[in-house]
Amino acid sequence: MFNKPSIFETGKPAADDDDNEGVEAENEAPIYAEGGNAKVEFKKGVEIQKSPYTRTFEQKVQKFKIVAPKDRLKKMDNGTLSLEFMEVEGRKSFILVFRTIRPMYVGTLVATSKIRRVEEKSHKHQIKTSQVFTDPKDNKKVLSYCTINFSKFEDMETFEKEYKKAVESLPKPKTA
């Protein structure tokens, strides 16, 4: 009844009967290395470009919700929130990034960006922010509002301090 050879038998390795091995190798997804010392090489001389932004804050968050504009309304769970800056010709530029596997939201901080705690929901450790979002559809800059839920109160406090410090370091708009 059980005279068939077992797939778990030790001995000689299974024969590779793949006739289209070269085609398969070109269409395979790249393998990504993790860790600081890992070196990643791609086929055909493709190089990884390092981001020009430096992270000042990075933390896992429970929820991230884009509240306004209404056409961009989106609720996302469990991701990484980071505050990053880039310096060009002595001027700093800050962005707020929410990632899951890839960046799901990127907002640019401006001098008029605001942040506040939601005291009505203190048990949720929730913060509301406003920043400029560049809509990829028509490349227009739109003011967007987001709510962010943190798992720990200390994480929320740290983010709030970093956000305020970033906004204060930006040049104020000139009034006419």
Image: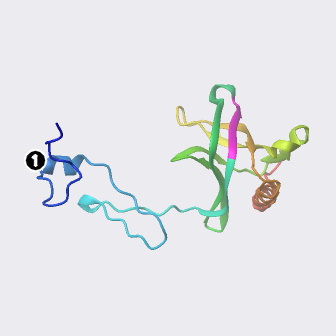
Task: Decide: is 147 above or below 59.
Answer: above
Left or right placement of residue 141 versus residue 137 in this view: right
Secondary structure mostly seen in the magenta stretch: strand
Q: Residue at x 51, y 47 (%)?
A: 102
Quarter of the image holding residue 158?
bottom right
Q: Residue at x 61, y 67 (%)?
A: 89
Left or right placement of residue 141 versus residue 26 in this view: right
Give the crowd class for mark 1: few <14, some 14-19, many >=20 residues within 10 Å.
few
Q: Residue at x 19, y 59 (%)?
A: 10
Residue furthest bottom in the image: 37
Q: Residue at x 16, y 36 (%)?
A: 1
Residue furthest front in the image: 1
Instruction: Name the image colouring.
Output: rainbow
Task: Decide: is 61 above or below 135.
Answer: below
Residue 4, horizontal then vertical, whole percent: 14, 42
Residue 162, horizontal then vertical, whole percent: 77, 60
Using the image as rendered, state which of residue 3 and residue 60 is in the foreground.
Answer: 3
Using the image as rendered, state which of residue 4 and residue 37 is in the foreground.
Answer: 4
Number of on-image labels? 1
Using the image as rendered, state which of residue 7 and residue 132 is in the foreground.
Answer: 7
Q: Secondary structure at mark 1?
A: loop
Residue furthest right in the image: 119
Is residue 176 shown to the viewer in this render? no
- In magenta segment, residue 121: no
Using the image as rendered, state which of residue 155 and residue 56 is in the foreground.
Answer: 155
Residue 174, horizontal then vertical, whole percent: 80, 51
Is residue 97 shown to the viewer in this render? yes
* Amino acid type at mark 1: Asp
Magenta span: 62-69
The residue that mark 1 highlights is: 17
Quarter of the image holding residue 72?
top right
